[in-house]
Every structure is written in structure tokens, then in C-alpha cells.
Image (cartoon, rainbow, N blue to C red):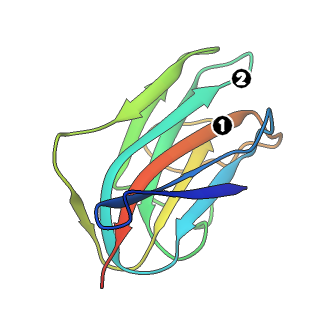
Amino acid sequence: MNTRIVAADRYVFTENAGTGVEKSRVADAYPGWLFSALMTNHSASTRWLQIFDATSLPANGAEPLVSIQVPTLSTGVFDIGHAVPIRNGIVVASSSSGPTLTVETVDSAKFLIAWKRKA
């Protein structure tokens, strides 16, 4: 994982380094504000970008705050134009089902998340 600070007074980006793929990402395990999240699906099947207010990846069957369908070899984006308050932490996952979490069995997603930690 490569974390780089971009305008520290505004937000922090976290992104994959190189061509690495993964199933999920704990962007931050602290309260803050989520600005946007992107997931590129590298699998041969449709996946769902799911966002959780949590400090670690929840168990299968958990209901996300957001679930966005992402077709194969496409990028899904969550960006509503303003910050979303997060009480616990920001976790993103690539799920093989839409309404609830079903964690993939193989790494096939790249994530880009923009957030700011609560001071």
C-alpha cells in the first residue's frame, strides 16, 4: 500500500502501489470524513464496491453504507460532492454480491479512497 498526503489540510489519498490488486482495504481505522472512493474491477465477473463505517472488514452478510455495481474491467465511483461523516473508520471491499457483503476469494480490485481524519 502506498499512502501519500495531498494537501494535508484538506484530505489524504490512499492507493495501491504499482499493479497490485486486493479484496478489501482499511483506509483508516479512525473517525473522519469520506470524500470519494473508486474501485477498478479486474475480475471476469461483475463486482460491487462496498463501503463500510468500520475499523476492519466485516463478516460476510454485513450491510454496507454504499454498494455500487462495477462491471468487469470497469471502474465504479462513489462521489456525492460533499464529505460523508464516518464514526468508526473507512473500509472498502470488492463483493461478489450487491445488497450484502460476500468477500471475493481472489484479489481482483484496485482502490483509490479520499478522506480526512477527524482532528
In the rendered image, which residue does mark 1 sit on? 110
- The residue type indicated by label 2 comes to His
Q: Is residue 40 left or right of residue 67?
A: right
- The residue type indicated by label 1 comes to Lys
Q: Is residue 18 left or right of residue 68?
A: right
Crowding near pointer 1: few (<14 within 10 Å), some, many (20+)? many
Crowding near pointer 2: few (<14 within 10 Å), some, many (20+)? many
Quadrant that contains the N terminus = bottom right
Residue 90: numbered disc: none
In terms of secondary structure, where does tag 2 sit?
Answer: loop
Residue 42: numbered disc: 2
Q: Furthest residue to the left?
A: 82
Q: Position of residue 79 (x, y in %)?
A: 28, 38
Q: Viewer-proximal residue, 66 or 110?
A: 110
Of the two numbered discs 1 and 2 on the same chain, state the one appearing first in sequence: 2
Q: Position of residue 40 (x, y in %)?
A: 59, 27
Q: Position of residue 67 (x, y in %)?
A: 40, 41
> In which quarter of the view is residue 53 placed?
bottom left
> In which quarter of the view is residue 115 placed?
bottom left
In terms of secondary structure, where does tag 1 sit?
Answer: strand
Q: Viewer-proximal residue, 52 or 13?
A: 13
Q: Is residue 74 left or right of residue 68?
A: right
Q: Position of residue 50 (x, y in %)?
A: 47, 46
- In this view, 119 is above or below 42: below
Task: Report the Cα–Cα distance between label 1 and label 2.
Answer: 8 Å
